[in-house]
Image (cartoon, helix red, strand yellow):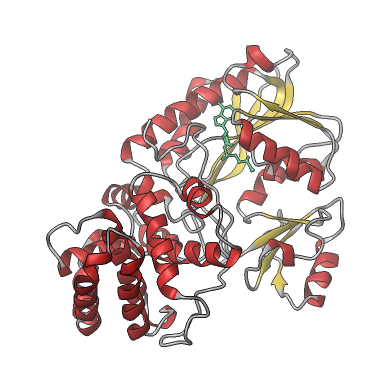
Amino acid sequence: MPRSIDQSGAAHRLSPPVDSHLQPSANGPEPRRPLHRDLRDSADLLGAVLQGESLATALPRLAGAWDAGRRGAAQSLAFETLRGLGRARVLLALLHPKRIKPAPLESLLLVSIALLTMPGQSRPYADHTLVNEAVQACALHPGTRAARGLVNALLRRLQAQRESLVAAAMGDEVGRWNHPAWWIGRIRAAFPDAWESVLDIGATHPAMSVRVNARWGTRDAYLTLLRARGLDAHAPDTPELTQALVLARAVPVDQLPGFDAGAVSVQDCAAQLAAPLLDVRDGMRVLDACAAPGGKTAHLLEIARCDLIALDQDPGRAARIDQTLARLRLRGAQVRVADASAPSVWWDGRPFDRILLDAPCSASGIVRRHPDIRWLRQERDIAALSARQTALLDTMWQLLAPGGRLLYATCSVFPEEGSAQAQAFLDRHNDALALSAPGQLLPSRTPDRDGFHYALFAKRANA
Ligand SMILES: C[S@@+](CC[C@H](N)C(=O)[O-])C[C@H]1O[C@@H](n2cnc3c(N)ncnc32)[C@H](O)[C@@H]1O
């Protein structure tokens, strides 16, 4: 299995960096930290991704001993680079047609080029600062020590000819859209009228959305608390999202009032649609088949006092479900480490009234939060993931009671994992009835949400 999919097939979910380092001004203030250190750190993170490792594993491996400021800065710069990596790669090839070696030098140049060519208003450092600090960063790694002259020459040429070089890079599809060519082709074919906005949004920063714990209190009560802390937010204009708030600016979770006491969870608005769609009621027997880290499990338990089994096959991730539920003071779930596709091992034979299958997928709908995903995935992964989803769907269907409902969810924008998968399921199961559900939700800025697909099936009682 390529390293781009972890063994669980889980989306690589990192908490978004709250940016302590990037200051959005064209030729802005001097950095508060030694920038050359942060450039080297972020180049190391980028290097790991270019070797096929997700940021979710590279960050703890490389940055485990770093303090929060250093870690946050490196993560921010790596995120920014990954958002503009297509452009940076094309520019590096224009500046130096022969492949740059060794890898630590290539990654330092890619970080520097991506930052130097961010769209004007969002460029975080004065050009001369960035170039000087990139040259200083050469001293920090044996693979770059001898390359000060080269780094200086390439970056100064880029600075001098930025407009024409960037225009040339924009003429290249990967340089323009900052996604791999196969990904661009699939999105263009699937959404002929919306493909450009899907790709463009993928390079933007998501808003921070929260879900107010209904067992704690109302959305209005929480909004009052937020405002008392000087944090503004608005309720999204989606009637189903009764507990959602979108913050005016992202903050670390420890600045959210009542976070440790379970008042609120961070969750994208598209993900908050799952639990209301499933229409759970008190006393129902519910299965959350792919549950970790427990965001949707918790939402289900906030809505109803149901008898819920939360499964995940990954022990490390399953432990996070327990943590999520403990923080939110939610009871009623049995958390199990098990493979949902092997029910003989964990199922007692009593059918479920409701099943949520939030299946392992490409995570192509959440690339705003995880800008490494698009560079890690390979085209062949999509068929492999789709086959796993098909198998999981068919197994889950056997566990559902007649009259029960199954919600199939993926945070993907590829039809093979969404609309085509749902249609094929209906074609295979004549006891399945499609109920009203959002179908394919494309990522969007207004309202702010990730890309998701939802299909809801009812099992005919008399088939
Ligand atoms: C998209 S994530 C679930 C996110 C979760 N529902 C939430 O809202 O927090 C998919 C999860 O499925 C788990 N998974 C993948 N294959 C599985 C299987 N066969 N059985 C159980 N869990 C599985 C992965 O470990 C991963 O945690």
Residue at 16% across / 69% down in the picture?
95
Question: Left of 101 or right of it: where is 237?
Answer: right
Q: Nearer the viewer, residue 436 or 112?
A: 112
Residue at 73% across / 18% down in the picture?
351
Question: Left of 217 or right of it: where is 15?
Answer: left
Residue 369's place in the image compared with 306, above or below, is below
Q: Is residue 63 visible?
A: yes
**What is the quadrant of the C terminus in the image?**
top right
Q: Quadrant of residue 104?
A: bottom left
- The location of residue 453, given as percent across then percent down, is 53, 44
Residue at 18% across / 63% down in the picture?
93
Q: Quadrant of residue 144?
A: bottom left
Question: Left of 9 or right of it: where is 235?
Answer: right
- The location of residue 443, given as percent across then percent down, is 50, 57
Residue 361's place in the image compared with 208, above or below, is above
Q: Is residue 87 visible?
A: no
Q: Nearer the viewer, residue 375 or 382?
A: 375
- The location of residue 416, given as percent across then percent down, is 41, 37
Question: Left of 312 or right of it: where is 57?
Answer: left
- Number of residue marks: 0
**Ligand 1: which quarter?**
top right
- Residue extending furthest toward the left: 98
**What is the quadrant of the N terminus in the image?**
top left
- The location of residue 329, given as percent across then percent down, is 85, 45
Residue 412's place in the image compared with 458, above or below, is below
Q: Nearer the viewer, residue 57 or 242?
A: 57
